[in-house]
């Protein structure tokens, strides 16, 4: 079935470090791909999305490119801040069914 | 514009009790769904609905019941609570599937003792 695999955390980085969180997927057809972020004690917020191959989603300095050939959607940020500390979820919509989530990656950024 | 509203935010139940988690959206969205979030498991789909009168099971439907009598509301019923249902529950809604933005409620923290 459709699934998302993302790197396990927790990931701990110093402020201004480069961030990569890997995400790969398995799906039939051409799913839409998403990154959601969950700050402590809060619900999920859409961070960015891409709906077709080679699309790049970007928001708040984060970027991810839809790579059909490698079935990947890795999240990157050039310089993380303490305020980026959160849990990040990669997700896909395979068709006319709801989101399928990865297990989440906890990011801690220290000053 | 309230978005997706979940109630209650916190609830403690005794094993065997029943309860309903409420979810309402004011955006006239067709799609609504319920997820549970457990440590190390991410979010798992319980039930979903693609429109009023239509519901379907997700990955972990056992022990839960849903109905969709109106576009706005999608309640989740726990029939006989068990400690394994201790979790954080999220309701979500969207215009449709595929690339449309999905909106989440703030979550309901449920503890079953």
Image (cartoon, coloured by chain):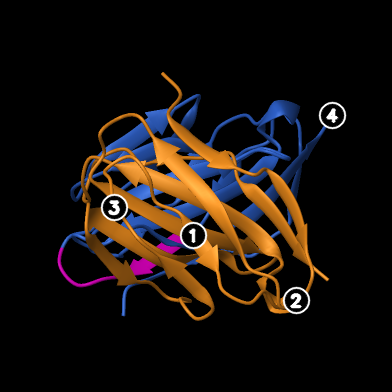
Chain colours: A blue, B orange
Query: Which chain hosts label 2?
Result: B
Res B8 → quadrant: top right
Residue beneath disc 4: A111
Residue beneath disc 3: B69
Q: Nearer the viewer, residue B15 or A51?
A: B15
How far apart are the two marked residues, 3 and 1, measured between alpha carbons? 12 Å
Q: Does residue B103 belong to the magenta stretch?
A: no
Image depth: mark 1 or mark 4 in front = 1
Q: Secondary structure at mark 4?
A: loop
In the rendered image, which quarter contains the N terminus of chain A? Answer: bottom left
Sequence order check: which comes first, mark 3 or mark 1? Answer: 3
Task: Give coordinates of residue A55: x percent, y percent.
Answer: 23, 41
How far apart are the two marked residues, 4 and 2, measured between alpha carbons? 39 Å
Query: Which chain hosts label 1?
Result: B
How far apart are the two marked residues, 2 and 3, measured between alpha carbons? 29 Å
How far apart are the two marked residues, 4 and 3, measured between alpha carbons? 50 Å
Marks 1,2: beta carbons within 8 A: no
Query: Which chain hosts label 3?
Result: B
Label 2 neighbour load within 10 Å: few <14, some 14-19, many 20+ = some
Q: Does residue A24 belong to the magenta stretch?
A: yes
Question: Same chain, marks 4 and 2?
Answer: no
Question: Is residue B87 rendered to the left or right of residue B48?
Answer: right
Q: Residue sitting at 66 percent across and 32 percent down? A: A84
Residue beneath disc 1: B76
Question: Same chain, marks 1 and 4?
Answer: no
Q: Which residues are magenta?
A: A23-29
Residue beneath disc 2: B83
Sequence order check: which comes first, mark 1 or mark 2? Answer: 1
Sequence order check: which comes first, mark 2 or mark 3? Answer: 3
């Amino acid at each position: 079935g459709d699934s998302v695999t993302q790197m396990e955390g927790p990931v701990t980085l110093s402020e201004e470090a480069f961030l990569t969180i890997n995400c790969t997927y398995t799906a039939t057809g051409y799913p839409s791909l998403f990154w959601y972020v969950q700050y402590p004690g809060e619900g999920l917020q859409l961070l960015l999305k891409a709906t077709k191959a080679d699309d790049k989603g970007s928001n708040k300095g984060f970027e991810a490119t839809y790579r059909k050939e490698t079935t990947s959607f890795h999240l990157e940020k050039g310089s993380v801040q303490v305020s980026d500390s959160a849990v990040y979820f990669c997700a896909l919509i395979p068709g006319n069914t709801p989101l399928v989530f990865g297990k989440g990656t906890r990011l801690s950024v220290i000053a | 514009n309230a978005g997706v509203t979940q109630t209650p935010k916190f609830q403690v139940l005794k094993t065997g009790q029943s309860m309903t988690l409420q979810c309402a959206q004011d955006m006239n969205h067709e799609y609504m769904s319920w997820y549970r979030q457990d440590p190390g498991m991410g979010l798992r789909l319980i039930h979903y609905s693609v429109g009023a009168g239509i519901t379907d099971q997700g990955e972990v439907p056992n022990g839960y019941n849903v109905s969709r009598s109106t576009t706005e509301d999608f309640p989740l019923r726990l029939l006989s609570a068990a400690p394994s249902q201790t979790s954080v529950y999220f309701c979500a809604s969207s215009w449709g599937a595929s690339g449309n933005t999905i909106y989440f409620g703030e979550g309901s923290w449920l503890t079953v003792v």
